[in-house]
Image: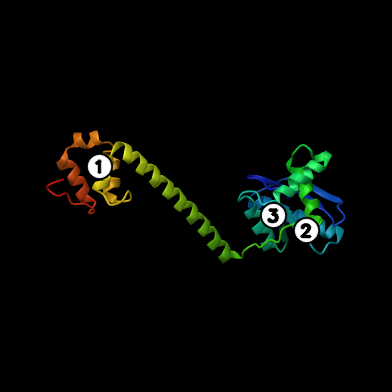
Amino acid sequence: MDIGSEFNAACFMDKEGNVLGRYPKIYNSRKGFDYFHTMVEQTKRKHKFTRVFIGMEPTGHYWRKIAFFAKETGYEVRFVRTTAVRHQRELDESSSAKSAIRDAFTIGNIAREGKYIDTIIEESVFRNVRTLAHVREKTIRLSTSATHVLQAVLDDYFPELKDIFWSTKAKGLMALLSNYPFPEDVRTAGLPVVTALLETTNTYKASPCQ
């Protein structure tokens, strides 16, 4: 299978490399997966096969849906390396121009020859934990990056704030910047108004000297 964002291309072949069917559009939906399952089972019955395994290139995150579906359906799933697909495409003159169905054929040949990666498809609970860990990691990176950007802007426009608030994550700072993002805005609003705003956050109490 050649994996895509909206649909996948599949080339069915036997262990000798004979092409048994080409399916250029298997959509990433329940209807598409059910269609794929039907085609696989029909091919198995027609040729009296007992074992099916699916080779695919793990492109981005799009491979997950069809891979999980295939495993839950009882098929073996094997990954092939992107470099192997590219190299094989360059060797095969008939596949010099990239296309989904040609890549599916190339991936099938690579997998058929046993040149695949040992694959572990996690069971449901481990899959959920793994996904949660990846999302958390990305969220932390985005949050850290946004904090650094904010700190750089404040150093340019509002350096006094670091002497007042303990952190760029302080609720009082967020409330202040949401309403008065620049020093001139604070000056225009006046000390009583700004002090009242900060006191409503319950994180900051102005002292007479401030």
What's the CA distance linking mark 2 and mark 1?
Answer: 70 Å
N-terminal of the two: label 2 or label 1? 2
Relative to 20, is 183 on the left or the right? left
Furthest-left residue in this view: 208
Quarter of the rendering containing residue 67: bottom right
Please give the residue where the numbered disc 1 appears in the rendered image.
Answer: 160
Q: Residue at x 71, y 64 (%)?
A: 74
Relative to 141, is 113 on the left or the right? right
- Percent x, y of residue 89: 78, 43
- Percent x, y of residue 210: 16, 45
The local secondary structure at tag 1 comes to helix
Q: Are marks 2 and 3 in contact (CB under 8 Å)?
A: no
Q: Are marks 2 and 1 in contact (CB under 8 Å)?
A: no
Number of the label disc, if any, that sits on residue 41: 2
Mark 3 or mark 1: which is in front?
1
Number of the label disc, if any, that sits on residue 34: 3
Q: Residue at x 74, y 39 (%)?
A: 98
N-terminal of the two: label 2 or label 3? 3
Quarter of the rendering containing residue 194: top left
Mark 2 or mark 1: which is in front?
1
- Assess disc 3: are there few (<14), some (14-19) or many (≥20) residues with their C-alpha within 10 Å of its C-alpha: some
- Assess disc 2: are there few (<14), some (14-19) or many (≥20) residues with their C-alpha within 10 Å of its C-alpha: few
The three-letter amino acid code for the residue at tag 2 is Glu
Q: Residue at x 71, y 58 (%)?
A: 117
What's the CA distance linking mark 2 and mark 3?
Answer: 11 Å
Figure label count? 3
Q: Residue at x 77, y 37 (%)?
A: 97
The three-letter amino acid code for the residue at tag 3 is Asp
N-terminal of the two: label 3 or label 1? 3
The local secondary structure at tag 2 comes to helix
What's the CA distance linking mark 3 and mark 1?
Answer: 62 Å
